[in-house]
Image: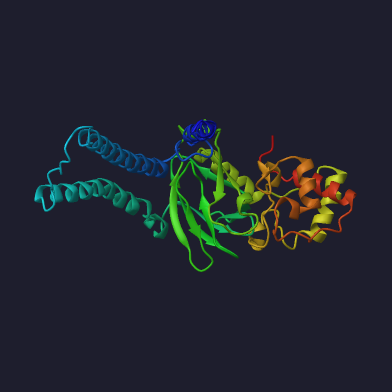
């Protein structure tokens, strides 16, 4: 028996660690640190359902221990058959009514919140001030179109705070799932239909993550599923309007000879797929829009936004994101051409210092 003791200690240790680590999370990627109305409602359902389950487990455990202790056979006692309760209408009604009541307690707010979260009627009104974003999931990147403003961008989603933001969700090749854990639950992006929902970001709480949140793909979509990330930048409506204005009228000009050389290479090799500038909407959907590439927080959604990591991506995108559609496209670039492209791409900014 003693030889099993160390193993049980290890199991107990890992069980306790798992229990505590399950509650850990960063404010930019945690469902338990909500930053908006949708996440608040969904967190309340998580807590309510958890409380009901814990209550049931505790009550059943207490009854079990009580019965085992009270009715256990003691040494010297005669074999006594306890009083049988089969057919007791009181007990049958009790253990039928209690589960029904517990289900009703959970069902009422769940149904109510479901209808509230599915209410996207504001999107269909002819004269509506609602911000609508068309989200398209690709292999393996995210495209964000603002149809009201004629803007298309990718990987970094810009949204104003303290107002509902409505989303049209689609996928181009395979099924994905759009998820911003701190803002709300996931929603599938399909290739054959459009899903719609809304999110809201509270200006008083987005500061806990420095106005930058992580988005994920929550549907197994291929070899780079775990690498299909995006970022969400939140800002006041005034700042968002300024960003829109900059995106609409931005025309990039190379600031150095190396950047100019990179622009020439880009126009010869990359412009057929990637769009840059005010006319970026015309080429949406082929490859990520690069109008504000220099302002982004990550490269390919997962690499640090540095020239070194951009060079790594241009040299071997397959190593960074297996099965991505850029693999093998620019494998013949020379080192000096890559250096020029890096210089040019890092200069593509709309938020000038």
Coloring basis for residues: rainbow
Residue 16's place in the image compared with 345, above or below, is: above
Residue 281's place in the image compared with 164, above or below, is: below
Q: Residue furthest front?
A: 76
Quarter containing the C terminus: top right
Q: Quadrant of residue 294?
A: top right
Q: Is residue 116 visible?
A: yes
Is residue 321 rendered to the left or right of residue 188?
Answer: right
Q: Quadrant of residue 325?
A: bottom right
Q: Residue at x 42, y 57 (%)?
A: 123
Q: Residue furthest bottom?
A: 192
Q: Is residue 254 visible?
A: no
Q: Residue at x 58, y 56 (%)?
A: 150
Residue 273 locus on image (x, y percent): 72, 61
Q: Quadrant of residue 282?
A: bottom right
Residue 141 locus on image (x, y percent): 63, 54
Residue 98 locus on image (x, y percent): 20, 46
Q: Residue at x 76, y 47 (%)?
A: 345
Is residue 103 rendered to the left or right of residue 296?
Answer: left
Tally of marks:
0
Residue 15 locus on image (x, y percent): 48, 35
């Amino acid at each position: 028996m003693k030889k099993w003791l160390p193993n049980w200690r290890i199991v107990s240790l890992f069980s306790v660690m798992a229990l505590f680590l399950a509650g850990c999370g960063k404010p930019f990627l945690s469902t338990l640190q909500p930053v908006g109305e949708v996440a608040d409602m969904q967190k309340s359902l998580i807590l309510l359902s958890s409380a009901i389950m814990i209550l049931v487990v505790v009550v059943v455990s207490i009854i079990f221990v009580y019965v085992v202790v009270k009715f256990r056979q003691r040494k010297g006692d005669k074999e006594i058959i306890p009083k049988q309760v089969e057919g007791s209408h009181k007990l049958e009604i009790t253990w039928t009514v209690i589960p029904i009541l517990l289900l009703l307690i959970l069902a009422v707010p769940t149904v109510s919140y479901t209808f509230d979260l599915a209410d996207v009627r504001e999107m269909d009104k002819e004269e509506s001030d609602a911000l609508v974003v068309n989200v398209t999931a690709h292999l393996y990147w995210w495209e964000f179109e603002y149809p009201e403003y004629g803007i298309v961008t990718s990987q970094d989603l810009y949204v104003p705070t303290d107002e509902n933001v409505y989303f049209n969700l689609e996928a181009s090749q395979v099924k994905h799932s759009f998820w911003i854990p701190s803002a709300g639950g996931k929603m599938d992006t399909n290739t054959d239909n459009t899903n719609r929902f809304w999110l809201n970001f509270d200006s008083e709480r987005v500061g806990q993550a420095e106005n930058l949140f992580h988005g994920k793909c929550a549907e197994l979509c291929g070899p780079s599923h775990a690498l299909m990330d995006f970022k969400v930048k939140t800002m006041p409506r005034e700042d968002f309007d300024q960003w829109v204005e900059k995106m609409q009228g931005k025309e990039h000009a190379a600031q150095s000879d190396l950047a100019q050389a990179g622009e020439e290479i880009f126009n010869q090799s990359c412009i057929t797929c990637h769009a840059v500038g005010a006319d970026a909407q015309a080429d949406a959907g082929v490859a990520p829009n690069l109008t504000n590439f220099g302002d982004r927080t990550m490269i390919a959604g997962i690499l640090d936004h540095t020239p070194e990591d951009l060079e790594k991506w241009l040299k071997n995108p397959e190593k960074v994101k297996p099965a991505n559609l850029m693999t093998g496209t620019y494998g013949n670039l020379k080192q000096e051409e890559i250096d020029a492209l890096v210089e040019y791409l890092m200069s593509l900014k709309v938020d000038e210092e």
